[in-house]
Amino acid sequence: MLKINHLNISFAKPLFNNQNLEIKNNCLTLLVGESGCGKTTLLYKLGLIDFHKKDCSYQIDDTDITEFHHKKKTILRRYDIAFVFQDYILYDHFNVYENIQYYASLVGNEISADKAKEYLHKVHLDIPLDRSLYAMSGGQKQRLAIACALTKETPILILDEPTSALDTENARIIFEILSELKKEKTIIITSHNQIAREYCDEVVQIEDGIITKIVSKDIQEKPIKIIQKGTHLPLKTYFNYLKKQYYFSKKMKIFIAFVNIMIIIFCLVTSQVTNNFISESKSIVSKDNPGWMYVPSLQKQDIDKLKIDSYYPYYNVSLNLLDKSYPVVPYYDEININNKIWTRFDLSKEQGFYFSHKLYYKNSHLIVPTQSINFYDTNNHIEISLLYKGILLKGLTSEYIDSSEFIYMHQKLIEEKLKPTEISGYTLFCHNIDDFTELKLKLENLNYKV
C-alpha cells in the first residue's frame, strides 16, 4: 500500500492542507478533479519526481520513503516506479524497437526482438518493430509509451492523462490494458475521461484541496518488493580486496611489479602516441582535407597576390520559409559533407539542401521528409522549389553566421537557383599547413579580418 500523510502544499495559495491518501497494491486507482486542483502535483509526489519531506510523509508498504537521501530516492524512482507522461516522451528519430531498447537500458535491461514483441503484445499493439513513429496514430503512440514503461519491470506504474488525446475506442483499449496490468502492478492514473470509472477499482476525488476516496473495492493485495540497488560498490568490497592481497604478500609483490611494468609501457606508448599526434597535427591540412578560411570584404584584385589552391565568392543570401527568413550557408566540393549529416532522406546525386538541426526541429511538425519544399527567394522575389536532402548534426554551426538556424546548400546550387550578385567576401582553400599559415598572416597584414 502507498500511503501519503500530512500532505501540505502551497503555491500562490494553499493547494493541500494536512491531507492523507492510501492507495492499495494491485489496484487501478483513478484521481479525478477539476483542472488545476493538484492531480498532477500529487502524481509527482507519488512518483518521487518532485518530493520533499517538508511536504508530506510517504510510505510504500513497510518502507518509509520520507527520510530517504536524494540519491536513494533516485534509485527507487528508477527501478521501482514507471511514469507515463501525458505527451508520451517518445523519440521520433527512433523506431518502435529503438524506443523500447532505450527505455529498457535506463535500468540496465537488454531487450531482444522477441522480448520487445511480448511487451507490444501486452499493450495490444501489433505493429512491426521497425515502424517509424511518423507512421503511428496517437493511440498507438500511447500504447507504445506504456510498453516502454513496462520494460523497467517496476511494481508501480503511474500515468498522467493517458487518454487525453484519444477517441473513445482507443481510450477503452488503454483502460482494458491497464485492467490487465493491475494483476502484477499498482497503477495510478489521472483522467478526465468519464469511461475511466468503469475500469478503475478506486476513485479518489480532489476538490477544494480535500482528498476524498469516493469509490473503493476490496482488492487482494500483493506486497511491493522495493528493489535496493546502489550506484557504486560498497567500500567494504575494496577493503576486503586489499585485505586479501595483504595475506598473499607474494602475489602482492607480483601485482606491484606488474603495475610498475604496465606504467613504464604506458609511458612509452604515450610518448610514441604524442609524437605521432604532433606529426599528424602538422599534416592535418592536406590534399584530401584542405584548410579553409572566410575573409569578409576581400577584394578580387588582392586574391591574385596570394598563394591559394581554390576560392569561392560568398553571397549573403537568405530564403523565406513560413514567412520567416533564414540565412543560406554554402558548402563546397572540398568539404566532406557526409561528416556533417545526422539524417539523409534523399540518396540521389541530385543537388538539394539540408536543414540545420535546430531549424529542422523548429519546423519538423510542418515538414515531411523526402520531398521538395517551396521557399520564397527575397533577393529575386520569386518562389523556388528545392529538394530536401536531410538534416545536419546537432550542434553544428557555421563560421559565416551567428545563428544556428540556417539552410545548407552547395555553392553551385546557390549560384544556379538564387543567382546572387552581391559578393560579401571570399572563402579560400589551401592544401598544406605552411601555405595556410602564411596566407592567414598575409591577409592580416593587409588589414583583412580572417
Image: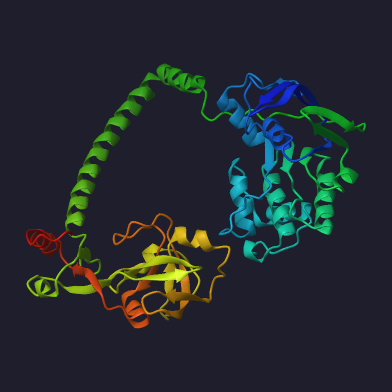
Q: For this view, does 225 lie left or right of residue 400?
A: right
Q: To which quarter of the image does residue 226 belong?
A: top right
**Residue found farthest to the right:** 218
Q: For this view, does 400 lie left or right of residue 166?
A: left
Instruction: Tell me what residue is drawn at x 68 percent, y 51 percent.
Output: 145
Is 433 rendered above or below residue 278? below
Q: Position of residue 60 (x, y in %)?
A: 74, 25
Question: Is residue 185 something one can see in this rendering?
Answer: no
Q: Position of residue 132 (x, y in %)?
A: 62, 64
Instruction: Tell me what residue is drawn at x 21 percent, y 56 percent.
Output: 280
Is 94 rendered above or below residue 200? below
Between residues 108 and 395, which one lies in front from this camera angle?
395
Between residues 128 and 368, which one lies in front from this camera angle?
368
Instruction: Tell me what residue is drawn at x 77 percent, y 51 percent.
Output: 163
Question: Is residue 363 something one can see in this rendering?
Answer: yes
Point out the image quarter for the C terminus. Answer: bottom left
Q: To which quarter of the image does residue 251 belong?
A: top left
Point out the image quarter for the N terminus. Answer: top right
Q: Position of residue 324 (x, y in %)?
A: 46, 65
Instruction: Tell me what residue is drawn at x 86 percent, y 36 percent.
Output: 203
